[in-house]
Amino acid sequence: MMRSLVVNADDLGADEARNEGIFEAIEAGVVTSASVLANGPALGDALSRIRALKKKDVSFGFHLNLSQGTPLGEGHRLIVGPDGCFPGKTAARELLLQQGNGDLEEEAAREMEAQFLRLRKAGLDIRHMDGHQHVHIFPAVAPATLRLAERHGIRWVRLPEEPPPSSAGRLRREEAALREEAEMFSGLASRARVHFGESRVMRTDAFRGLYLKGRLSVELLEDVLKNLPGGLTELMVHPGRAAVDAGGPFSYFSTADRWAELKALMDTRFRDALVRQGVRLVSFPDA
């Protein structure tokens, strides 16, 4: 079976440093898709870069955000803190794990619609959808995610379900914490799978990237390609440049790690491994 890979860069619009790195990888042909933050401080810069892009074999998606920054919808009571902003990663996770809270689900759905419409009104061709910190597959959000995708004709929605690496080796404490986080997200995706089964939206045959967060290297990319299953796989990456001003709601993670991911993707060994393993780089199909 043919093996095809979508290399998707998350967080386009987070800041200009992140945008710069993502588009460097797009121009080099090693990133084939990117997910856009509708409430990102650098959304305008991202949209300008997209409009100026000459490459046609790149897809763009909607990166739903319910955890950081300022919402686009009005009148929220449950999904924001006292300052009117999203409550942060940890608090958002605890909140969105709830099931059966109709008011919470309605608020999240309204904000989701507002963010999608911001991108649609800007003229963005939205082929796929995923979530900042995977909020789109949390119990309070997953059904509304798929309803929005069906209503607006978004063909692809990320299901970040990924088997753990066969051998983790000895992990530093922070790597072990990242592994636990990856296992949590994959478990949530497994539970959300039932909603995908009832929907007309599509998902890739496989997903990779949860276990690469904060540690992506050429060697790990080569290992991903070597063990890639047949069909279409999405590889989630977070390349970029390090932000000079780390004061914004997203710039605090535009660190040297983003630059390390960019260098790994741009390394000729990654391209050589694609050829050697017979893996074809593609964007999300529009049908």
Image (cartoon, grey):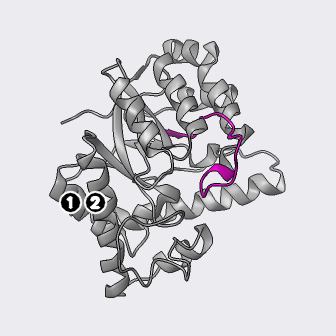
Query: Which quadrant holds residue 137?
Result: bottom left
From what the image shows, is residue 257 above or below residue 28? below
Q: Nearer the viewer, residue 264 or 199?
A: 264
Is 101 placed left or right of 210 in the picture? left
Q: Where's residue 231, x and y in %?
A: 35, 33
Task: Measure the C-alpha gap from mark 1 to mark 2.
Answer: 5 Å
Above-or-below relation of 4 to 41: above
Residue drawn at x 42%, y 84% is: 77
State the image coordinates of residue 195 (x, y, percent, origin top left): 28, 66
Amino acid on which disc 2 is placed:
Phe
The residue positioned 53% from the left and 12% from the top of the image is 276
- Determine which residue is flagged by label 1: 199
Q: Report if residue 1 is visible in the image.
A: no
* Residue 168 among magenta residues: no
Q: Residues within 10 Å of mark 2 (few under 14, many from 20)?
A: some
Of 207 and 93, which appears nearest the observer?
93
Residue at numbered disc 2:
196
Check the picture and name the quadrant holding the C terminus. top left
- Residue placed at 54% from the left, 50% from the top? 163
Where is residue 44? Give x, y as percent: 42, 42
Say which amino acid is labelled 1.
Answer: Ser
The residue that appears at 73% across and 60% down in the rendered structure is: 177
Q: Secondary structure at mark 1?
A: loop
Q: Which residues are magenta?
A: 235-252
Do labels 1 and 2 touch, CB within 8 Å? yes
Q: Main secondary structure of the magenta part?
A: loop
Lateral position of residue 270 relative to residue 141, left or right: right
Residue 103: quarter of image? bottom left
Judge whether 188 appears above or below 214 on screen. Answer: below
